[in-house]
Image: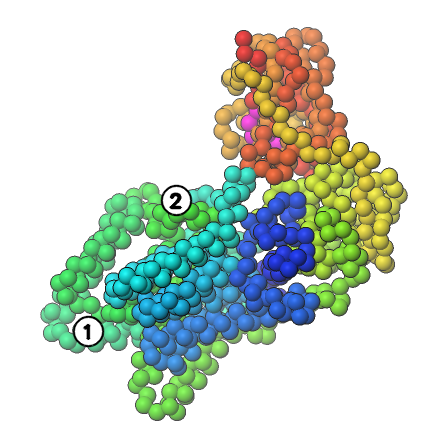
Amino acid sequence: MLRAIYYWDAYTNAMIMGSRVDAALGLGPLSLHDDYYFAPLPDSIVFNENHFGLSLIFAPFYLLSGNGLLAYNLTLLISLALSAFFTYLLVRRLTGSGWAGIIAGVAFAYSPYVFFELGRIQLTATQWIPASFLLLHRAIEGQRPRDALGFWLVYLLQIGTCLYYAMFLIPLLSLLGGLLLARNRPPRQFWVWFGGAAVAAGLVALWMVYPYFAVRHSFDLERSLALASSNDGKLSFFANVHPTNLTLTGMHHLVASGAAHDEIAFPGFTALSLLAVALVVPAKAALSHYNLGRGLKSAGRWVALAFGAFAVSLLTHSFLAGAAVVGAGLWFFVRHRMLLPFGGNHGAYLAVLLLALTMFLGIHPLEWDGAPVRGLYYYFHTYFPGFNGIRKVGRQAVMTTFVIAVLAGFGGAWLFSRLRTLRGQALLAAALLVGLCYELRCFPHPLERVWGAAEAPSVLRFVASLPADDLIASTPQNTGRELFRGDWGMALHNYLALHHKHRFVNGQSSWQPAVTELARRAVERLPDDGARRALLSIGTRHVIVYGEDLPSRRAGLADALAARPDEYRRVFQDGPHSVFTLLEPDARSVELLPTPALPEGARLIPQTELRPRASLRSKRASRVLDANPSTHWTGGRYQAPGQYFEVELGAARPVVALELTAPPRVMDVPVSFRLTAMNGREDLGVLAEQPLLRFYREQIFEPKNFVFRVVLPQPVTLDRLRITVAQPVPGSYFSIHELRLYEEAR
């Protein structure tokens, strides 16, 4: 595979596409909304792209070859080719020039932005963007039912390829569609076909994306305004290419470790040059029909409109107000037949470019008078479902690049029209292609060798023979000597699931649920009993040990597991590779618990009456009583037996329940604990106890709503309460965001 930046995302994407195919054909224990990773959570597509659309290209290669990586590479190549092809068709339709279409297609499909994202196929597969614009033109201008159906089908394919791009397309297609409808005024029959196709597509889209919205009450998948605005696009991005570009070395976007690599929006010198032609030529032609005075007067009106809209945006701190001024000004200009240098499709795509650029600048494009100015994207993020799940707003660079490529097609068409002979046009096309290929050059590109179908170790074939519903864990995950190291090593487990075809509890993605982090930490601490219980609690049945890649400090893990036959049974061994089955004589002791309900009539004790104290970082303990869920106390080290947190009451009260909340850190609460109390000098002893780890169903499946709650069998009058860690949660700190005590209502 290509060793691009974030190349390990290819492991995940190959697994996701394979999951779609395996689920559809019953080749794996999956529903159509499941991937192999993130077990035991259902509908695990919600933590990444769904890839329903790309899987249609992936499927025949995967099924014929049995090699997920080969199928991935072919899908990537076909996607690049289709992107160039659909852009060619669109520009040829708009300009009448096939030569211009070729140049625009190459400029877009192989642009610096796309090649920077080469490791992530969902961001490289841009083919449905030009296809949707092409079919929108055909549907409205030709008014044929098949084109209306085609448009909505292509948009569904975009939803099934990259949800980011599907959302980014909405305002741009809406603007273009509105302009085309105003120009063509289709009859009622068109609305029947187009609307009917839209309803059918909407139902399919709802089935595809429903899980993304359904789980939001259980998982915190929304992106805050602050997070999204920190990823706004900036004009400086248009001067950047990634260091994989071997020609434009002076424009390399070099970042410090841990900084963003994706600030790439440069469309290419060839595209920009042709864009300049596309803008200058019609403007000059329009001005030639006016005398100097009238031309300057018309140009002044356009400048005044631009400055007026910008001034209104600053004064109102909103680009929406500025957009309204622009709309009103354009309407006035059209009604009074003022100078319109860019008409027809040319003007439509210039308007789309301005909208794309404004959306790219994001939620807060700039500040004025000490306060941020809201961009148009702010209103989509706030009021349009789905936009608040987008993290990388700057990825709208793909849209600015696409529209620049289309407008460059207009410039290219004009140049080709100046040449009367086919030979001259071919020579110009060749020169432009040479220039494009040189400035976009990323070859030779480094490669990464990965286990293929024939090279996969026998341990994966053995795991494939285990019962289909058994959940798997693997070690090492990201601490290996060579193969399973770093993010790429952890993501490799995602790809290997296509070989063993079992859901597994560890894995890698840019966003991971708490249960997956629990699994990762537990696997790294085997054979610890708490780690074993944690894995059993989430349904893990077997552990694969890749012995040759274990770090030196864990090189003897397989022998250590085999030495505890009551807890681990080796069921396979081939050289350094082993598979162990996790054992627990009392299966009920690891079942997930329900969260107990508060006793009827329980009354919250005012937090102002509580004084906290902790065995670690006691000076920060007051944060759990500040009624601010964003602040928290933490011990600052891994849980260990004996760590405690206690509260002292101003006066003795009949306490019935204790609650601890830690929404972003649900695995940091002490699910194995001892609850003790005092009343004055009287030691009340242990009020409640859980000596071994017992996790809660909500903690795993609904962490957003989870509250750790201990309900006493009967009210206990006390003035001091302490909760102490018993068996530690593997790899977790002891943390609390909010603490609440409840008393019996008097």
Give the magenta-colored segment's residue range. Answer: 735-739
> Was residue 533 drawn as part of the magenta stretch in this picture?
no
Q: Tag 1: Cα neighbours inside 10 Å, few (<14), some, or many (≥20)? A: some
Residue 737 shown in magenta: yes
93 relative to 716, above or below = below
Give x and y (percent) for residue 649: 58, 13
Can residue 691 be seen here? yes
Q: From the viewer's perspective, tell me whether residue 455 is left or right of residue 389.
A: right
Q: Which residue is mark 1?
A: 286
Give 162 or 132, whichever is nearer the viewer: 132
Tag 2 secondary structure: helix
- Residue assigned mark 2: 382
Image location (x, y in percent) of residue 15:
64, 58
Name the residue nearer the viewer: 356 or 565.
Answer: 565
Residue pictured at 64% horizontal, 23% vertical: 710
Residue 404 visible within the image: no
Amino acid, disc 1: Ala
